[in-house]
Image (spheres, rainbow, N blue to C red):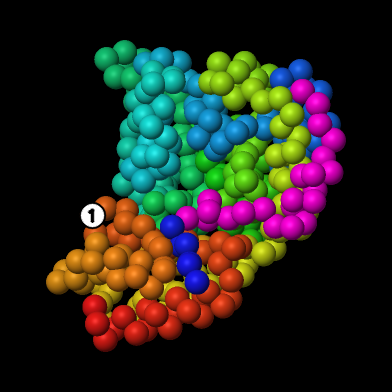
Amino acid sequence: MEVNLISDTVTKPSKGMLRAMLQASVGDDVFKEDPSVNILEQEVLDLFGMEAALFFPSGTMANQTAIKLHTQPGDQLICDHYAHVYNYEGGGVSFNSGVSCRLIQGDQGRISASQVESVINPPDFYHSPKTSLVCLENTTNKGGGAVYDFNEIKAIRKICDKNDLALHLDGARLWNALEVTPEDTKDYGRIFDTISLCLSKGLGCPVGSVLVGSKKHIHAAVRIRKILGGGMRQAGYLAAAGSFALRYQREDLNDDHRKARELEDVLKKSNYVNKVEPVSTNIIIFSLKVDKDEMIFIGKLKEKNILLISLGKGKLRMVTHRDYSQEQHNYVLTTLIKMNDYV
């Protein structure tokens, strides 16, 4: 038995999803003639109560497109120092848009309205970059799946309105956040200028993200997607997977969250663990005690066919997902408990 807890991107389509993909009606999406893509985009924009949506090959491309929509070369965006757009998108902020990042050290990847307000550059001080965009991430990846308090998001929106800043949400795992908070999709649609939504993580699709926003923004996003090489032809086979996931697989995220909390409980009781970050959704980040070597620890788990990842600086990460079965979960829990004897 091999257990892959490196990421929730390792999932494979379910049987029902594969059937939906095989039965999809397709056309040429570059000409907006793929009916399955059109259906998915309509479903997502309706969910969020926004004007338009656009299907992308990846969340990174959707985020990079949104950043380019809201900025000009030489501008600056504000984000947490753990933000995916800064750490894990290949320097695309600077390469694609000529924009710099003003980093804030928040709480598990979450920044506050007061922090945002404190780092906005004066618009008439031409020696510093023009602040034009705030990027939030919910849930936070490097922050351990933490979820924003929606009242803080609303406070950040007010700061953005006051200072004429755009507000983008990297919602790669927003589906996870929506399962553990009282807000719904339309609440987010009313707050953000643009939202990127990943389908290939917790929802289990093989490929795909969707960007939602105003008609003006999405019209411009079509051109940017083309420039970045994201125009796809018979993409309906992939879009059909997204439609299936939205209809039938969202609630399954709660099972991922339960398993993550159970892993958190075992790790907290383990004699080799120094700290476990608070677990809110499906990501567990923890560190070992100073006398424990993380690579030896990873190697010992790999010998047991359990895979996880190092984030560097002593942090390790496990991510639960829909292909992580209860049988696998029981095996991992038992193995972690046994590690107390030989780590």
Tell me the quarter of the picture where residue 107 sits.
bottom left
Q: Residue 309 in the image: state x and y as whole percent.
A: 36, 57
The range drawn in magenta is: 7-28
Magenta stretch containing residue 291, yes or no? no
Q: Is residue 169 above or below residue 233?
A: below
Left or right: 41, with 206 as reference point: right
Q: Is residue 241 visible?
A: yes
The quarter of the image holding the C terminus is bottom left
Looking at the picture, how far across and down is residue 78, in whole percent?
A: 40, 34
Q: Position of residue 96 (x, y in %)?
A: 44, 20
Q: Is residue 13 magenta?
A: yes
Q: As rendered, which of 70 and 295 lies closer to the eye? A: 295
**Pointer 1 local density, CA inside 10 Å: few below 14, some 14–19, many at least 20:** few
Mark 1: which secondary structure? loop
| Number of numbered discs on residues | 1
Q: Residue at x 80, y 48 (%)?
A: 20
Residue 43 is at least partly visible in this image:
no
The residue to which callout 1 is attached is 313
Residue shown at the point (44%, 79%) measured from the top left: 333
Give coordinates of residue 23: x percent, y percent.
Answer: 84, 44
Q: Amino acid at mark 1?
A: Lys
Q: Quadrant of residue 91?
A: top left
Residue pictured at 48% horizontal, 42% vertical:
136
* Image-based side of 164 in relation to 215, left or right: left
Judge whether 57 appears above or below 298 on screen.
above
- Looking at the image, is 224 positioned above or below residue 195? above
